[in-house]
Image (cartoon, rainbow, N blue to C red):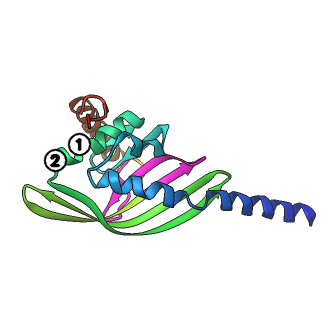
Amino acid sequence: MAQMTREKTEHAKDEQQLEGIFERIMPHLLNLYGSTATAKDFEIYAPHATFEDPLMRAHGVDQIKSSFYTLPKVFGESRIVEYTVKENVIGPGKVEIIIDNKQHYKLFGKDVDLTTQIRLNVEDGKVVRHEDWWDKKPLKNRDTVNFPLMGRVAEVTRRGSMLLTHAFMRFGKDPKP
């Protein structure tokens, strides 16, 4: 009985330490998606973090920078206009944050609105995995499609798109202020 109480106390302590992670991360995400990112905004990521959406698959902070520094070059406007959040403690020092949101973009003068789900895996206060599911649909890969070869083609295409973008964006260099 005493051991169960200690385990509950340790788990409650973990949850208490993990509270507030979303409040610390969200302003940076708003900057990233709002095309106003600075080098400081990328400090939320662990060095080995990944970012993936239906167009790109980035590995490491420099590639993640390239992904988000591309937004103002492609879109006249970009921002998250509304969101709701769920936080789940999934283990010691690990949190999953799910952000259901609406994103607004302006492309060639036309308004484009997306309903997405941003999924963040956070370990020890740093984002290690960031996925953006457009229309709240899981990313297509060999595990989520009926024909695994087509899923693998989707993975390779996203990776190739990222590498081209990364080269175009000067390999994740921060823009001059």
Q: Position of residue 124 (x, y in %)?
A: 60, 46
Q: Determine if the magenta segment contains residue 128.
A: yes
Q: Position of residue 95 (x, y in %)?
A: 57, 56
Query: Measuring 78% from the left and 58% from the top, which residue is drawn there?
Result: 10
* Residue tagged 2: 74
Cβ atoms at labels 2 and 1 below 8 Å apart: yes
Question: Residue 4 or 82: which is nearer the viewer?
Answer: 82
Q: Which residues are magenta?
A: 119-141
- The secondary structure type at the circle numbered 1 is loop
| Left or right: 89, with 69 as reference point | right
Question: Residue 41 or 164: which is nearer the viewer?
Answer: 41
Query: Measuring 30% from the left and 54% from the top, which residue is drawn there?
Result: 33
Type of residue at label 2?
Val
Indicate the quadrant where residue 134 lies.
bottom left
Q: What secondary structure characterizes most of the magenta part?
A: strand
Crowd band around label 1 with a 10 angstrom C-alpha radius: few (<14), some (14–19), many (20+): some
Type of residue at label 1?
Thr
Question: Residue 116 or 175: which is nearer the viewer?
Answer: 175
Question: Residue 85 or 76: which is nearer the viewer?
Answer: 76
Indicate the quadrant where residue 1 lies.
bottom right
* Residue tagged 1: 70
- The secondary structure type at the circle numbered 2 is helix
- The numbered mark at residue 140 is none
Q: Residue furthest front?
A: 177
| Left or right: 101, with 10 as reference point | left
Query: Measuring 32% from the left and 47% from the top, which residue is drawn there?
Result: 37
Pick the quarter of the image with the C terminus. top left
Residue 22, placed above or below residue 169: below
Spatial CA distance of label 2 from label 1 is: 6 Å
Q: Position of residue 77 (x, y in %)?
A: 18, 57
Crowd band around label 2 with a 10 angstrom C-alpha radius: few (<14), some (14–19), many (20+): few
